[in-house]
Image (cartoon, grey):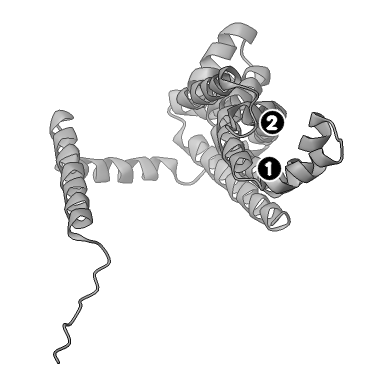
């Protein structure tokens, strides 16, 4: 009696063809985009020399300028903090509306999705331009821009977390005669609390980075000094500002990573 050998394959023929077609299509898109943009690999040769020249102009950094950037750096961190906290508050109802299993009806579900999409589709710099026109130059415009941009990020991810909750806990609370608000408070919030805190901290970390360039459009923070230095070709001053921004970003990353370990 012969035993037919069976060769195990991770993907069947149809799946392999699909993966091959997808990879080939992606390669064609990249090549077509490269051709459309008329990119030339030879341009990188000149860029290397230009970078070396710029690095020479930036060294040594203008260390004596450091006291001038302490206050703008603190303002940058505050812009990120205020914007993130406002987004945290606003994202909770947005997430509730955009969660298909909790939203009251299709109209509110659509409203939640529209808010998330509009917020995430517009870059922070563009939001900052709008709010600088509305409120004038300064930290207020920057904080509001950070908040509006972050609502979509937090609302989307929290909405997805809400859609994955255990409905049994919610039903158990409701069975005791609790109101809809208390059902949400005691049956839903505890399930998403780690994600809520972790995502907010993570978004604050992102916002610290984003807030460093808002000054380019007049929305406050260290970006104002950076724009002025670049515009006046003060490359040594640019160097010390960039180093200061790098230090703040590294510190925020450390704080963010430590805080996230405490909510897991």
Vertical order, 165 against 69 (above or below): below
The x and y percentages for residue 179 are: 84, 31
Quarter of the image for the N terminus: give it. Answer: bottom left
Q: Residue furthest front?
A: 1
Return the mark for residue 92: 2
Assess disc 1: are there few (<14), some (14-19) or many (≥20) residues with their C-alpha within 10 Å of its C-alpha. many
The x and y percentages for residue 48 are: 26, 46
Given residues 20 and 206, the one toward you in this image is 20
Question: Could you say whether the residue bearing mark 1 is in a helix, strand or loop?
Answer: helix
Instruction: Check whether the beta carbons of the residues at disc 1 and disc 2 lie within 8 A of each other.
Output: yes
The first of marks 1 and 2 along the sequence is: 2
Where is mark 1, residue-wise?
A: 196
Assess disc 2: are there few (<14), some (14-19) or many (≥20) residues with their C-alpha within 10 Å of its C-alpha. some
The quadrant in which residue 93 appears is top right
Q: Distance between the residues labelled 1 and 2?
A: 9 Å
Given residues 92 and 78, the one toward you in this image is 92
């Amino acid at each position: 009696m012969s035993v037919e050998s069976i060769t195990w394959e991770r993907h069947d023929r149809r799946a392999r063809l699909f993966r091959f077609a997808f990879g080939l299509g992606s390669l064609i898109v990249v090549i077509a985009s490269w051709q459309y943009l008329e990119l030339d690999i030879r341009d990188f040769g000149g860029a290397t020399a230009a970078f070396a020249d710029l690095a020479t102009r930036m060294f040594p950094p203008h260390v004596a300028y450091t006291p001038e950037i302490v206050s703008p750096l603190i303002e940058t961190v505050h812009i990120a903090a205020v914007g993130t906290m406002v987004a945290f508050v606003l994202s909770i109802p947005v997430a509730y509306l955009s969660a298909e299993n909790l939203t009251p009806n299709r109209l509110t579900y659509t409203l939640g999705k529209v808010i998330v999409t509009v917020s995430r589709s517009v870059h922070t710099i563009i939001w900052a331009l709008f709010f600088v026109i509305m409120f004038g130059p300064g930290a207020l415009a920057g904080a509001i821009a950070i908040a509006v941009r972050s609502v979509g990020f937090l609302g989307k991810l929290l909405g997805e977390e809400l859609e994955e909750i255990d409905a049994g806990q919610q039903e158990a609370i409701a069975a005791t005669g609790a109101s809809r608000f208390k059902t949400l408070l005691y049956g839903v919030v505890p399930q998403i609390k780690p994600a809520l805190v972790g995502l907010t901290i993570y978004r604050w970390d992102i916002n610290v980075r984003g807030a460093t360039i808002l000054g380019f459009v007049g929305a406050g923070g260290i970006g104002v000094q950076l724009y002025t230095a670049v515009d006046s070709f003060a490359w040594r001053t640019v160097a010390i500002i960039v180093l200061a921004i790098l230090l703040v970003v590294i510190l925020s990353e450390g704080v963010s990573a430590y805080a996230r370990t405490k909510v897991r």
